[in-house]
Image (spheres, helix red, strand yellow):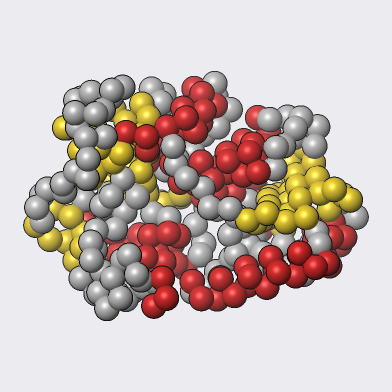
Amino acid sequence: MKAWVLARYGPPENLELRDVPFPSFKDGNELLVRVLASSVNPADRHSLRPPFMFRRRQGFLKPKYGRPGLDLAGRVEVVGDGVKDLHVGDEVYGVGRGAYGEFAVSDQIELASKPTRLTFEQAAAIPIAGVTALQGLRDKAQLRAGQRVLINGASGGVGTFAVQIAKSMGAVVHAVCSPQNVELNKSLGVDRVFDYTREDFTQSGERYDVIFDTQLNHSLKAYRHTLNPQGLLLIVGAGPGTVGQLLGRLLRVLLGARIVGPRTKFYVASVRTKDLVALSGLIEAGKVTPVIDRRYPMNQVPEALRYLIAGHARGKIVLTT
């Protein structure tokens, strides 16, 4: 089978499209999925050149596995003897190992049936970004109807899902984005859009119950000033930069927030069937639709990752076979 392989750490140019053996199962709970579409995520980008201290599982000097790609949509080809709810031929979406290739392996708890109203490309745009937004707003923030939420970084992959999910929950949604994405956010139902080149939301006089932040580009004082007394700063990302830069920015904010506030949470989403099913329900009800910026053929994975790294994507970047 054909798959992209990272033989040595470095930029996207280090990826090579090779003939490789079919991936093996770890246990009977796994499935082999024929990948019909995938999408790129910041996690894929950071796995190309992780800090040395985080390479224990991946390999210190070179990648042990070297098969990138997480998000996928496709058809089940082989099921393990412990798989109960999925069958050969089923159309599925979720995450797996080595999704930048013809076939990938997933655990049954990482997959769900593909929403019938979506193409494989649309379904592949959902898993990590959609689940991140859902778990943040529903579980971490426990957002309720009528509450006010600010999405900082509203036109990215996670942000476009967060806007739609928050609206589906009955929240008043304000969004921060670049000028070229103002109309996109209005089309998603945002109640007020801040063009960050013209207006700083922390100086607007608005107050929020939740700030859902993918950028982390304001001071703790500014966040405190913008949140209601019991409001929550929910950190989903830390903006552009290397893994080391992001971790440094994140740690400074988390440590500072423990001392001076505001109430702050940070989390990393875990894609599971129940959350994919919940997203499927929102999609089938017409409340959430994936926003896709660009589509690349699977033989152009390095180009897709370079576009992600440039930081100008509106919604998701999808790969198709």
In the rendered image, which quarter is residue 12 located in? bottom left
In percent of width and height, residue 159 lies at 59, 49
In percent of width and height, residue 112 lies at 37, 29
Position of 266 relative to 257 (above/below) = above
Position of 178 relative to 210 (above/below) = below
Q: Nearer the viewer, residue 98 or 120?
A: 98
Tell whether 274 sits left or right of 27.
Answer: right
In percent of width and height, residue 78 lies at 16, 32
Residue shown at 31% from the left, 22% from the top:
85
Tell whether 215 sits left or right of 105.
Answer: right
In percent of width and height, residue 221 lies at 84, 67
Residue shown at 40% from the left, 26% from the top:
115
Residue shown at 42% from the left, 32% from the top:
273
**Quadrant that contains the C terminus:** top left
Tell whether 125 sits left or right of 34.
Answer: right
Position of 95 relative to 19 (above/below) = above
Kindly tell me whether residue 120 is visible in this rendering.
no
Position of 268 relative to 275 (above/below) = below
Residue shown at 42% from the left, 76% from the top:
53
What number of labels is visible?
A: 0
Kindly tell me whether residue 233 is visible in this rendering.
yes
Q: Nearer the viewer, residue 198 or 219?
A: 219
